[in-house]
Image: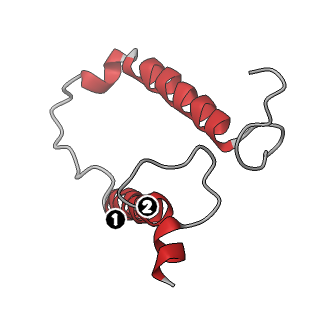
Amino acid sequence: MPGDGGYGSALLGYHYYSWALIGFIAAIVLLAAILLFDRQFEDDGATQPVAGGVFAYIAVWLVIGLTALNVVSAFLECGPRACADNPVVYELLKHGS
């Protein structure tokens, strides 16, 4: 809403959730543009190599690892309950000490 400070600090004038929205929209638009090219579906008779190789393997495990760390961080911050409106402490670490 206009005049709302938002949560967290801003990066180049936008908050993290705004950057995430911009990134998701860009990814959707770019993927839709890629799918418009029919040449990728043509059969030229050549055998296809394994897609990506080591890079794809590392990328998949990086996404899995970051997702797992995000789950752990959110659980430490909120615990098994719903998060506060603007969480500023890790609830499970605060109660554990």
Where disc 2 sits, the SS reads helix
Give the residue number, with chain letter if any, for mark 1. 54
**Quadrant assignment, res 72:** bottom left
Q: Nearer the viewer, residue 39 or 7?
A: 7
> Which residue appears at 36% of the width and 62% of the height?
68
Q: Nearer the viewer, residue 41 or 4?
A: 4
> Outermost residue toward the bottom?
97
Q: Which mark is residue 44?
A: none
Q: Quadrant of the N terminus?
A: top right
Q: Position of residue 89 (x, y in %)?
A: 61, 65
**Is residue 26 placed above or below 95 in the rendered structure?**
above
State the separation of the CA atoms marked 2 and 1.
18 Å
Q: Are marks 2 and 1 in contact (CB under 8 Å)?
A: no
**In front: label 2 or label 1:** 2
The residue beneath circle 2 is 66
Percent x, y for residue 61? 34, 63
Q: Amino acid at mark 2?
A: Leu
User: Which residue lies at the image location 33% right of the left edge and 20% below the top edge?
Assistant: 39
Q: Amino acid at mark 1?
A: Val
> Is disc 1 placed on a helix, strand or loop?
helix
Horizontal side of 39 relative to 27 (left or right) equals left
User: How many C-alpha atoms fall within 10 Å of the one at disc 1: few (<14), some, or many (≥20)?
Assistant: few
Of pointers 2 and 1, the one earlier in the residue sequence: 1
Say which residue appears at 46% left-offset and 58% top-offset: 78
Choose top left, top right, bottom left or bottom right for residue 59. bottom left
Residue 69, x across and y down, in percent? 43, 65
Q: Residues within 10 Å of mark 2 (few under 14, many from 20)?
A: few
Residue found 24% across the figure and 22% down from its top: 42
Foreground: 46 or 38?
38
